[in-house]
Image: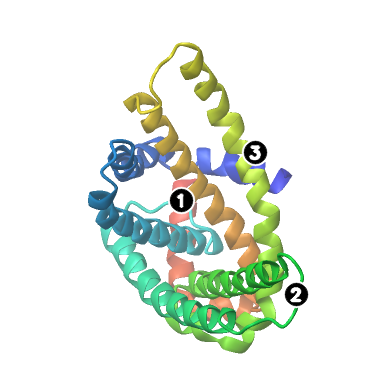
Amino acid sequence: MAPIMEALSESMHEDYSFLKFIIYSIPIHYVLALHLSGRHAYALFFDILLAILIAGLLAQGINNVRRNRTYILSIKPAELSKSCAKSTAVLLPVGLICWFIGFSICKIPIPVNIPYFSSVVHIIIWTILFSLIITSFLSFAKYLKMKEAFKIKLIIDSCIDVLISILSYIPIITLINIFLIGPILYMLHIFEISYSNWLFVEYCSIIFVIDISVSAIYLAQTAYEQIKGNNEEYDDIHQIDLFNDSIERITKN
């Protein structure tokens, strides 16, 4: 749990952190408000846009951490737009391929007449495929190079280790969110205030942005430890950028 608490502290103290939390909470707040008002069909389009934004923020954030930059979440429009476009171009085909494989495998009858056995098998299949998608995304985000997402052997070799790291992360970040949101929910219940209150929705939106920042730090560490690749290879890919980033950090300090 300590690394995640360190990631939380780092995300709270990065450059212009509060400003970024406010800026990126706006689209999240808007989408949440649409769902809370019952306009689910109308919200679907914005759900897709928000998913693309989150994927772009995560990918750029992971890359920023790997490059030891002075910030995690990017507010540079050109940089973020490029990251969103690349993330979509990576996740869409990989996701469709894994969905097709999973759907095809799950259609095969299982000749075992044990209650819930087929459901357990299907859950395992979809979990493994999910880990392939996440590993592919992390492999891409390490370098922000799309070709890295399609190194099949590397992804297959690393996916189980990545899955274990993700499964270890989920309950801890969930507990942190319960700790941050639970008391507010209790107060709203006591004073009979609607959960759709705009201040509460904004607060939850900010917490979600913090989650993205913390996740970027944790996933960057996961990618570094679990997906093969050494620092010399990484430095060769980012030689010029690393030099400029070093100058930026020295100037900042």
Tag 3: amino acid: Leu
- Judge from the rendering whether residue 49 lies leftward or rightward of residue 247; answer left or right: left
Measuring 71% from the left and 54% from the top, which residue is drawn there?
Answer: 168
CB within 8 Å, label 3 to label 1 = no
- The disc at residue 175 is 3
Q: Is residue 114 visible?
A: yes
Left or right: 194 as drawn, with respect to 118: left
Task: State the image quarter where residue 33 is shown.
Answer: top left
- The circle on residue 113 is 2
Dot 1 amino acid type? Tyr
What distance separates the C-alpha of mark 3 from that of mark 2?
38 Å
Tag in front: 1 or 2: 2
Coordinates of residue 185 in the picture (x, y in percent): 51, 24
Between residue 23 and residue 186, name the one nearer to us. 186
Q: Secondary structure at mark 1?
A: loop
Cα–Cα span, label 3 and label 1? 25 Å
Instruction: Please state which amino acid type lies under the numbered disc 2.
Output: Asn
Q: What residue is shown at x 67% (from left), y 66% (from top)?
A: 163
Residue 208 lies, with reference to residue 152, above or below; the image says above
